[in-house]
Image (cartoon, rainbow, N blue to C red):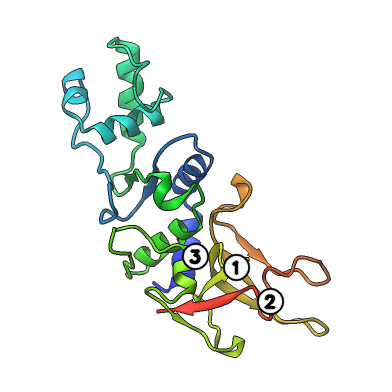
Amino acid sequence: MNLADAAKKLGGDRIIMDSYWNFQTKKQGWFFSPNLKLESATAKPKKFNTWDDWDVAAPNQKRTLATIAGFKEDATNIKRIDSDLSKLKSAYSKWQNDLYSVFWGNQYTGTWTCNIFVGDALYLAGRNIMASNRHYYDPRQIKSGNGFKTRKTIDEVKIGDIVVMHGGSHVEIVTKFIDYKFADKGFCSRGAGRGNQGELGIEKCDVNFQFDEDRELKNFKNSFHYL
């Protein structure tokens, strides 16, 4: 799978995108990822039917189940009653077997998720690119050449390249080019770390005759990178 297709697949997974948003807005301290190799990635318990299963679950498994079930993440408002167990069992059934809850502290990532989207898309495309601490590279690291090569000119840019935007604070994946007759060439991209939930993962494109130049190829604040 190429990176642009992987970005489309990832961006269409609303379970993952919603978890990104909840992590980004500090509603929860974790996000879902398909990448088991990330630092603190937590697998779903092998089974969950009784309070005994709850008692033997790992702390991060409990936090994940509690959050999905609508309890406090620290599980302090869970009571050992049938109705609460039923909510936890329902949460267990909603946790997909191929997704892992990842608990990253703010000292590593802040609350934005643009680099997480790029890293997860790379993983889906068969390229697991991580820093030595098993976290994904952030935009400034990518811009500096950590793990990636840099396009020398905009004529070299290809679909599936990683674009570092806003001077080095945001990163997305190029998915399409747009040619205009009387304006500079633009591009479309997918990503996360955006300002509202509905925009996470969707394809956003340069629009002709608007003041927003974020997705113009000639924007000097953008740089393009590849493996």
Distance (Cα) linking label 1 and label 2: 9 Å
Residue 21 at what x, y percent from top left? 52, 44
Q: Amino acid at mark 1?
A: Met
Quadrant in which the N terminus appears:
bottom left
Assign a secondary structure to mark 3: helix
- Marker disc for residue 139: 3
* Disc 1 secondary structure class: strand
Image: 213 above or below 48? below
What count of labels does the image hold?
Answer: 3
Residue 35 horizontal/vertical position (percent): 31, 56
Identify the residue position indicated by label 2 in the image: 219
- Residue highlighted by disc 1: 165
Q: Is residue 20 left or right of residue 179?
A: left
Q: Quadrant of residue 94?
A: top left
The relative height of residue 56 versus residue 43 in the rendered view (above or below) is above
The span from disc 3 to disc 2 (Cα, nearest Å) is 17 Å
Q: Are marks 3 and 1 in contact (CB under 8 Å)?
A: yes
Give the amino acid type for the residue marked by disc 2 in the picture.
Asn
Earlier sequence position, callout 3 versus callout 2: 3
- Asked if the residue at tag 2 contacts the one at tag 1, i.e. Cβ–Cβ closer than 8 Å, the answer is yes
Label 2 CA crowd tier, 10 Å (few <14, some 14–19, many 20+): some
Q: At x 61% / y 47%, what residue is drawn? A: 198
Who is closer to the viewer here, 97 or 66? 66
